[in-house]
Amino acid sequence: MRNYTKQYINGAWVESESGKTIDVVNPATEEVFGCIAKGNQADVDKAVQAAKEVYVSFRHTPVEERQAMLGRIIEAYKARKQDLIDVMTLELGTPVTKSEKVHYEMGLKHFQAAYDALETFEFEERRGDNLIVKEAIGVAGLVTPWNFPTNQTSLKLAAAFAAGAPVVLKPSEMTPFAAIILAEIFDEAGVPKGVFNLVNGDGEGVGTPLSQHPDVRMMSFTGSGGTGSKIMAEASKDFKKVSLELGGKSPFILLDDADLDEAVQAAVAKVVNNTGQVCTAGTRTLVPEHLKDAFLEKAATEMAKVKVGDPQLSETEVGPIVSEKQYNQVQTYIQKGIDEGAALVYGGLGKPEGLTTGYFAKPTIFADVDNQMTIAQEEIFGPVMSVITYKNLDEAIQIANDTKYGLAGYVYGKDHEKLKKLARSIEAGTVIINKAPRTPDLPFGGYKQSGIGREWGDYGIEEFLEVKAIAGFYQ
């Protein structure tokens, strides 16, 4: 059992004020494998106070010192590689190979990207006799989701540290142990006391009081639109800055000149990656009408190759859904797809054959999906593909943008002019053409109800800064 019932506040592990705990369940076995503190208002107050006391001094640390600190974090992070891999496989159920090649690596890349950004980031700009200064906003509250325990925490933490803003982090109570290891990494790396504070707990006990706290100047949240709306409402009461990365219903648009085999592989990967628990998952697959049957045949064959099972096995590609609640939600959406008249091509309700224990869902393909169906409009957060056909490029663009979300989009084909037109026309914060890699120095965020603000690299640092104009500074 992994029992971590203390909070990390002001550079030390201290007892939680609540005296209560939350069990953490392994989604592959449905067994409790650890517990964490169930924090409360008093814990939040202590953490915010610790951050507030060091805010001014940390804000004024030389950039070189903050960069050196990030460098030490990178080395300490590398030293805990196996621990991070092990714990993410246990708490999230992600296959061990994905824990290493995706989750561990993504966290590392964000610390490296912030380190690199400080090489050229301009915190001051002279305009005549005047000076423009960018300085840390103050104490930042960070609330992170369960689906990427290192990525979503690291990108916020790295940016805040680079900017000079102390933080209070509340990770998801379903995947808290990666954040606990990060706290140990920061301690090892010599992050000053009070700069990083970790308060475990649930949304009501920790997230809400953090959003309400008068000494918190900014809230950075990644998660559902419903929770984001509540955080924004609380933050608005004293005009905190808010950065939100919310849901998505991203289109994957296939051109008629695409290599069909390659396109099918890419489309399936965008659906099953991280068991579909990805805000940027390309779950609306837009296919030219005349390619529908050929695409579906190949997609079903490709989906059948996906190995679902024990995340501890190296050959496993897809693990379980994170919790019973999330598993039931995925099942509900699959049933809605059936009830609303979509054609079930592959997968469906229940667990894959041979898997009786664990929250495993069947990778699923629906055809004949109308873009107004529930499965095409709402974020399922499971490995479910909705295939929608289109007649021409303009219709594909209309369908792609006919959603309240705008986080990501994918275009696949050979005609560069068409690809460029699609990329410029899709209303989303990120558009990826074919197999182009997405580097961590590119801004990340959404249009419409997918969020407010941008993260990653130098854009992420900007979120934690205020701009000050000093007239006559050089007179």
Image: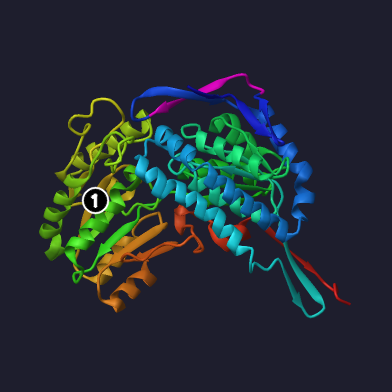
Q: From which residue to which does the magenta span run?
A: 17-26
Name the dominant secondary structure of the magenta segment. strand
Q: Residue furthest top?
A: 19
Q: In this view, does 46 lie to the left or right of 250?
A: right
Tag 1's secondary structure? strand
Q: In which quarter of the image is the C terminus?
A: bottom right
Taking the spot 56% from the left edge, 35% from the top edge, the residue there is: 180
Q: Which of 88 and 288 is in front in this view?
A: 88
* 163 shown above or below 181: below
Q: How many labels does the image show?
A: 1
Picture coordinates of residue 11, whole percent (x, y): 70, 36
Q: Please say whether residue 283 is visible from this viewpoint.
A: no
Taking the spot 46% from the left edge, 46% from the top edge, the residue there is: 104
Picture coordinates of residue 36, whole percent (x, y): 54, 26
* 121 shown above or below 279: below
Q: Label 1 amino acid?
A: Ser
Q: Please say whether residue 267 is visible from this viewpoint.
A: yes
| Residue 21 among those drawn in magenta | yes
Q: Which of 333 and 146 is in front in this view?
A: 146
Q: How crowded is mark 1: few (under 14 residues within 10 Å), some or many (20 or more)?
A: many
Taking the spot 72% from the left edge, 50% from the top edge, the residue there is: 138
Picture coordinates of residue 273, whole percent (x, y): 32, 48
| Residue 136 among those drawn in magenta | no
Q: Is residue 31 left or right of residue 134?
A: left
